[in-house]
Amino acid sequence: MMIHALVSALLLAAAPARAAQADRAVWTWEKDSYAIVEDTAAAEEAITFLRSKKINIVYLYADAFGGRNLIESRPDLYRALLRRLHGSGLRAYALLGSAYLHTEEYVLPPKQKRALAMLGRVLKYNAASAPEERFDGANLDIEPHILDQWATQRDKLLLDYLDMGRKLMRLKRRSGAELAVGPAIPFWLNGITLAWNGRKKPVNEHVQDLYDYVALMDYRDHALGRDSMTSLAAEELRYGARRGRKVVIGVDTSAGEPKKVSFNHLTETDLERELGLAEKAFAGEPAFAGFAIHHFRSYRKWLESAPAEKTGPPGAASTSTETVAGLQP
């Protein structure tokens, strides 16, 4: 019996360890974030749901909403929630950006001070909080392509966006905070080349040069082949590896057109299969830092709706990893 036990132990020790599942984050917008910040029962229910879906990072909104700014007026509520999240094995990133506040306008030079104040409140909160109460990072969702003037002033807006990013990261460095800061960016920025800060290169590379990581809005409903999660993320991951940056792969579950940008017309089984294929494909990429799902409310609604008819498996028959650059959704 002792010999058998010893042999079994040796075999187990020699067996290759099973790789842990990649991190999964979820964007959690204003109303849902405020609900779980203010209501402990809602927070516990959300944590149970997130853990059941193997989500371990919450992009938690941390700015003004509905005439209030709880990160400033009620930091005790955030501290209690972050203690609870960390105690449950989850991490929390401050989600900064809002349709409610029209933060796409923050790239405009006269309004960039609002972006600095937004991040500054989170830095101040972390500095005044115990380690278990602090945000682990920040995710910036400021999208200049939403602005009406994008069609005629694209390059200027992108240069303003880069200038804003440089100011934000200088603010972070001056604070001395150990906080991973990165933006959500569309995958097609690699198709736009601009001269900035003395260098001419694709905009996505300028962005990675600035920040600690990026969350790539890599919105496709299939993992492999042309126009897929893997093909559209390939350049971002290669550059991230060169620069020592991390890239989070964003996927969508909300209703949208064309269908290929979201899993909304498919099933949870489809989502899990495609994320598994993407994770396997990204396994050798040092920059790969997991997935982010857009977004908490639409994800839950989609899971709960379970429509009788779906379109079937996504069109991912090809296994090509050819990059399709500059293709907007």
Image (cartoon, helix red, strand yellow):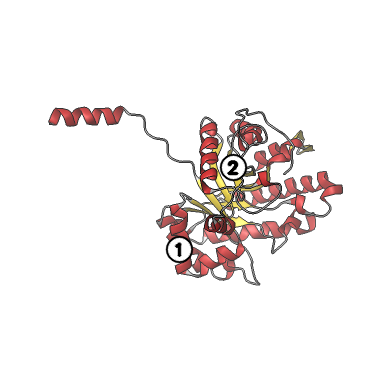
In this view, the residue farthest toward the front is 308
User: What x and y, as percent, mark residue 306?
Assistant: 54, 55
Residue that numbered label 2 is attached to? 249
Is 191 on the left-hand or right-hand side of 308? right
User: What x and y, as percent, mark residue 211?
Assistant: 63, 43
Q: Residue at x 66, y 42 (%)?
A: 210
Q: Residues within 10 Å of mark 1 (few under 14, many from 20)?
A: few
In the rendered structure, which amino acid carries the disc numbered 2? Ile
User: What x and y, as percent, mark residue 205?
Assistant: 69, 36
In this view, the residue farthest toward the right is 152
User: What x and y, as percent, mark residue 127?
Assistant: 53, 58
User: Is residue 32 shown above or below 197?
Assistant: below
User: Is residue 325 shown above or below 88?
Assistant: above
Residue 45 tag number: 1
Q: Secondary structure at mark 1?
A: helix
Q: Would residue 45 be visible to someone looking at this image?
A: yes
Q: Residue at x 84, y 48 (%)?
A: 151
Q: Residue at x 43, y 53 (%)?
A: 52
